Image: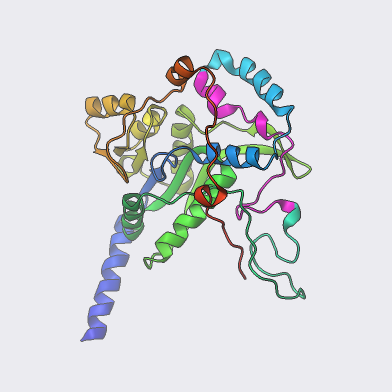
Amino acid sequence: MSGTKEVEEVDDVDGAKEKNHGVAAFFDLDGTLVALPSLEKRFFRILQYRREIPAKNLFLWLREALRLMPRGIGAISHANKMYLRGVQILNECGEGEKEVSSWHKDGHQAKGQASAPPRCHPRLPVPPFFAQAIERVAWHARQGHQIVLLSGTLEPLAGAAAQVLEVELGLRGITVKIRVCATRLEVMDGKWTGRILGEAMFGEAKARAAKRLAEEMRLDLERCYAYGDSLNDRWLLAMVGKPAAVNPSSDLASVARTRGWPVLHWGRKKIQRRDTELTEKRRNGTPTPGRLPSVEQTVIQVQVTD
């Protein structure tokens, strides 16, 4: 009798997944799944603290900011990565390419090499996810929905976050592969050039990416879900049939009320903030990173194990 019940439960799960084929949940990352400041800001502070950013990159960043100025402050914030020019690239485990010795890049030990302890790298900032966010992602995974991180952050940072989230889901007995679509950077001789490959993943670019993924993955966008926290996510939210504003800025909250979108508050009390940093700049002048938290406070070290 017990065996029959287990078979019925498996059939129910398989049936639910078959019914939900063609459905995905698109998640923004910064401010939606994890608390602000953004992963990239945390990453910048760590690189700055470790003095890995060449001094000349400030001038390169300013020059690129002037070039992007006609496209608005959003383009300057999201499409200007010249501060990373000449910085050694990281793989998704947080290691620099030259630091992988007896371990393959997929995390497995190279054949014939002596055993070595797990290694970690302190440069990938992956703060804890909101508890409600993990539960929502887990719910989608149980329904058989595809999980997609659609973020304006750098691709290695989004990839590291996806790995941590997969581990969190694994602890709940859920095995799922999370798709990542984020801002990609050009690489030359193992270092970033500061130039973006394709589009910076913010604003309308997110909606275009969701449409491309829908064609590739054969998704029905009317049945899909999307979660975002800023006004830049409104195009993505409008693209799907089941959007939700999470920890929304005042601008996005206003749009959500107008369009009848659900508003969710994860991990904190109601947040009141503005999307752009223009107000902050006018009030304080050029914003500074502020006091640098310790590496232990800002980084979860991702171990590379056999």
Query: Taking the image as drawn, is residue 226 in sight?
Result: yes
Give the residue displayed 26% in from the left and 72% down from the top.
9
Q: Is residue 190 magenta?
A: no
Relative placement, left or right, of 155 versus 203 is right
Which quadrant, please, contains the N terminus? bottom left
Identify the magenta region: 73-97
| Along the line of sight, the residue nearer the viewer: 199 or 81 | 81
Q: Position of residue 59 (x, y in %)?
A: 70, 22
- State the count of labels: 0
Say if 253 sits above or below 88 in the image. Answer: above
**Residue 86 among those drawn in magenta:** yes
Residue lying farthest top? Answer: 70
Query: Image check: 21 left or right of 125?
Result: left
Quadrant position of residue 52: top right
**Coloring scheme of the render?**
rainbow
**Any part of residue 176 in sight:** no
Residue 291: x percent and y percent?
Answer: 53, 36
Is 221 situated left or right of 79 in this image? left
Where residue 274 sits: x, y (%)? 37, 24
Identify the residue shown where x is 74% and y is 27%: 56
Task: Please name whichever residue, 220 or 79, is drawn nearer the observer in this view of the structure.
Answer: 79
The residue furthest bottom is: 1
Q: Quadrant of the C terminus?
A: bottom right
